Image (tube, rainbow, N blue to C red):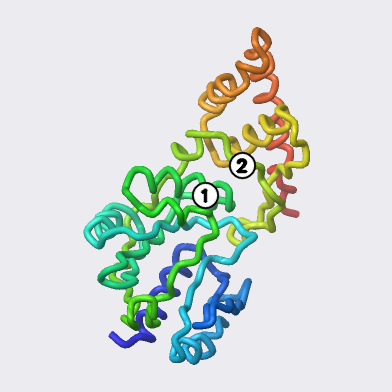
Amino acid sequence: MRAQDHTDKMLHWWSRVGIDRADLAVRRSDGAMLWHTDQALATLPLTWARAHNAHKAEVYVRPARGYRWPLLFLDDLPEPAASAVARKYAALVVCTSPAGGCHVWLRASMSLDEDQRRQAQRYLARRIGADRASISGEHLGRLAGFKNWKRDGVWVNLLQASSQRPWEPRPALLESTPPTTRRRRSDPNDRQTSPHRVTDTSPSGADWAFTCHLLEAGCDPALVLARLVQSAQPRRGPDTQRYANRTIKRALRHLARTTTKEPNS
């Protein structure tokens, strides 16, 4: 398979799982980073990237920042472990070099914002031995079909592009309170903006963001309630159960209002 074929197959798989915009980055040999951000996959400047790669620049890609995407990144997995993931779940496996291991792009069952992706990647990295330094939610991965000059110019190859079932991220989202959610643009797949934008940095504000965050992701309200009680108990004491019940009820009403659509005319 030609180098261009590896690139095309990687981007085609991304498109099939719902990724339609990407950030393309080149790191030159002098350390300078050059970017083409928020580009449609079909218009990525690949000729430009190949010209830089020929001069020993590294070429990276990621789903465009600022959107919710159903894709998670795992770094530095040995090939047998990466292949096992792809046999069980919908995943793309990219071999960065024989010595450097594989990148895995794992399809999730729902679109996730950057903070949610970071949570899910942290959860996965602990369980399968992926690099814990590459779980930021917006990490760059190598683009298949280009040379890896960090490893003496070996080709970055696509190994697998599976179409198994997506991975379910809800257990990872329930595991711990997410960081404060920043403002995001709408998901180009569902066109629905996150119903909460956090500006209140008080403990109650953080509880509200946490509750909306998990309910929006489809988590069971009873499980969210239990997690909220656990989180608020040291602060609220005997008032915890009343406070948690009220927060859940308000959040459910809030989400119902923000997700109700006008009937078709």
Depth check, front residue: 222 or 226: 226
Image height of 197 relative to 50, above or below:
above
Depth check, front residue: 176 or 90: 176
Image height of 114 relative to 65, above or below:
above
Q: Residue at x 55, y 28 (%)?
A: 224
User: Hey, what amino acid is under mark 2?
Assistant: Pro
Left or right of 252? Residue 28 is left
Q: Which residue is mark 2?
A: 179
Image height of 124 relative to 248, above or below:
below
Q: Which comes before the other along the chain, label 1 or label 2?
A: 1
Depth check, front residue: 259 or 265: 259
- Under circle 1, the secondary element is helix
User: Hey, what amino acid is under mark 1?
Assistant: Arg
Look at the numbered discs 1 and 2 and tell me whether their residues touch, using CB distance below 8 Å.
Answer: yes
- Under circle 2, the secondary element is loop
Residue 69 image point, x, y percent:
54, 57
Q: Residue at x 52, y 49 (%)?
A: 118
**Looking at the rendering, in which quadrant would you find the N terminus?**
bottom left
Separation of residues labelled 1 and 2 (CA atoms): 9 Å
Disc sitting over residue 118 in the figure: 1
In the image, farthest residue toward the left? 80
Residue 73 image point, x, y percent:
44, 58
**Looking at the rendering, in which quadrant would you find the C terminus?**
bottom right
